[in-house]
Image (cartoon, rainbow, N blue to C red):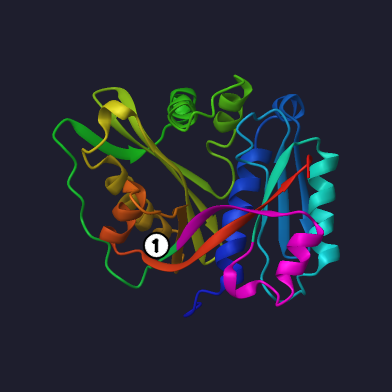
Amino acid sequence: MTNVLSLGLAEQTEIDAYTAFATAAPPAVRDTLGVGSLRLGPARALAIREDPSRFFNRAGGFDGNEPITADLIARVCRFFAEQSVPTGSIMIAPDLLPSDWPAIAAQLNLEEGPTFVKLAYDLDAAVVDVALDSGLRVGRLEPHQAREWATVMMETFELATPNEMIDLAEGFVGAPDWQQFAVWESERIVAVGSLYVHGETAGTFGGATRPDARGRGAQSALLATRLRAARDAGCRWVVADTGAETSGQHNPSLHNMLRLGFTRRYERTSWVWSEHR
């Protein structure tokens, strides 16, 4: 097994999860939403034309084994333009940025966007037990619960418009390499989370809790459950990413992961292409 988690593997697990999520939906859903993807050597780019949030328009997975050149990044920008999306984010681990990156960014009119924290969990370590509040239970999702689960995920993230975005999320439940989990209060799903198995590395994905159920241990329980599931799947590492904190901000997801034993690996700034620049 891999004793050291490479930057490339951490980045590829993330973008492959997003791409696998978006492309698992039925063709009619993908066509309606305008889902497109592009392979660029070790990297990938994804776009969803009808997603008004622009959250899924991204490129990543650069591993440093192939040069990151102006021509390569220009191909990513052309992909976003060809997919008719107004913006797209390019994710490159900071240690992989080439020395001439400021010139590349200026040439292609890229602007700095949000910063994310990349975290990792070494599954050689023990997974701590997490106590849920009374009345809550955590477990693996059953196929017949897929619609409710997808609705919780997309509504919590404010990604449920248009309605086909919920169809998109429903479509990856039970897809190859994916495992889905939930927390229930009685028979109602109040929190959700997924695990993407990518060889010896797995990625957490889509952890969300309804506002009225927050602060009761749901996401910590889902994280611990997914760590155990990744170990059972033969993984050595679990990677995750979440928004970096700025002055005066507090990101509960980040602190949940740190408390559970995830370690910070790096902070990564996204570089934003826009059709208007």
Q: Residue furthest top?
A: 163
Q: Which residues are magenta?
A: 92-118
Left or right of residue 61, residue 275 in this image? right
Residue in the image at 30% along x and 64% along y: 261
Which amino acid, mark 1? Arg
- Report x, y in % for residue 32: 74, 24
Quadrant location of the C terminus?
top right
Question: Residue beneath label 1, please?
Answer: 231
Give the secondary structure at mark 1: helix
Image position of 76 (left or right of 174): right
- Residue 183 is a magenta residue: no
In percent of width and height, residue 82 lies at 85, 41
Q: Is residue 98 magenta?
A: yes
Q: Between residue 10 and residue 23, name the one nearer to us.
A: 10
Residue at the far bottom in the pictured view? 3
What residue lies at 61% left-to-right and 30% top-to-bottom?
168
Residue 90 position within the rendered picture, expressed as x and y whole percent measured from the top left: 67, 55
Asked if one can make out residue 234 in the rendered structure from this viewpoint, the answer is no
User: Does residue 66 show up?
Assistant: yes
237 left or right, relative to 63: left
Occupied quadrant, residue 56: top right
Picture layout, residue 187 above or below residue 247? above
